[in-house]
Image (tube, rainbow, N blue to C red):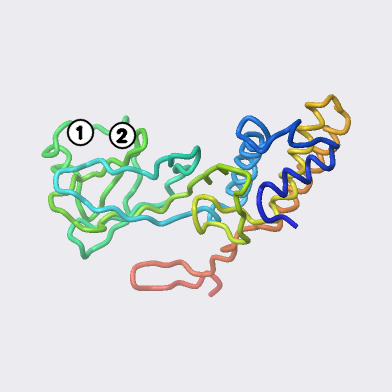
Amino acid sequence: MYITLSDVFNSARFRTGTSTSDFADTNTGLLGLANKHLRKISLSLIENNEDWYATITTASLVNGTQTYALSSDSSLSGGGMITLNRLEVTYDGSEWQVATPMDLEQTSVPTALTADINANFSTSEPYYAIYGNNIYLFPVPTADVSGGLRKFEVVRQGEATNSSFFFNMATGASLYQLPKEFMEPLEDFLTADIYERIGKVQEAIATRQSGETRLEQLRRQFSPRNEDFDLNVGTNAYEDYGE
């Protein structure tokens, strides 16, 4: 039964007839290899179903400030934003608008001065551009608004820091979550790595293929949770597509 990464490591070593003296539970040993595969596994989940690792965060608007940070990497590798799916903004703390993405390089309006920007963009129809790890708002806020920005982001998972790393049955509860079912392909991938390192190439190929098969089966099982979009949500109205 998988409880921690250490259990996965022990199982992989048992299958290959190796020990901790051969492959330690360290960042230069199995932990480093595990994080390599965990990145692949979590990204395969995101590819199949973004909402597993989606999050909604808020930020406050600051008078005269145009740039607002996206989620950034934590002290661990991983944890940064992959996709910004939606941005909502309120310039007065009351009326919310969905901001429209724009190509800043194709904008004919000068963007060096707030006065130029705000003369050409309206708070009733805001736009945004992403440069680096920042959101650039159009128009620029002219008042402080607490929690005036809502970011709908898809984030990458953080990495395991030690062999005591614990996996829950849920996903999305933090930056370090993965369903326990995905420990099985992880074990196969680690076992294949060990086989390859000790020169058992055919065993490595077969075991890696087993891991890929398991991962694909799990990807299909963890299909999108919001598959049937029956309603089109408009302004003060719900339109049933089936009618």
Give the vertical position of 12 relative to 111 (above or below): below
Decide if residue 58 is on the left or right side of residue 112.
right
Q: Earlier in the sequence, mark 2 or mark 1?
A: 2
- The amino acid sitting under disc 2 is Leu
Identify the disc placed on residue 43.
Answer: none
Report the front residue among 239 and 105: 105
Residue 18 location, x and y as percent? 81, 35
Mark drawn on residue 111: 1
Residue 104: image tag: 2
**120 and 2: which is toward the camera:** 2
From the top left corner, tell me how far across and down residue 160 is, in percent: 57, 44
Per the image, label 1 sits on a secondary structure element best described as loop
Residue at 63% x, 42% y: name it. Answer: 38
**At 26% across and 58% down in the image, what residue appears?**
147
In the rendered image, which quarter contains the N terminus?
bottom right
Spatial separation of the CA atoms under disc 2 and disc 1: 9 Å
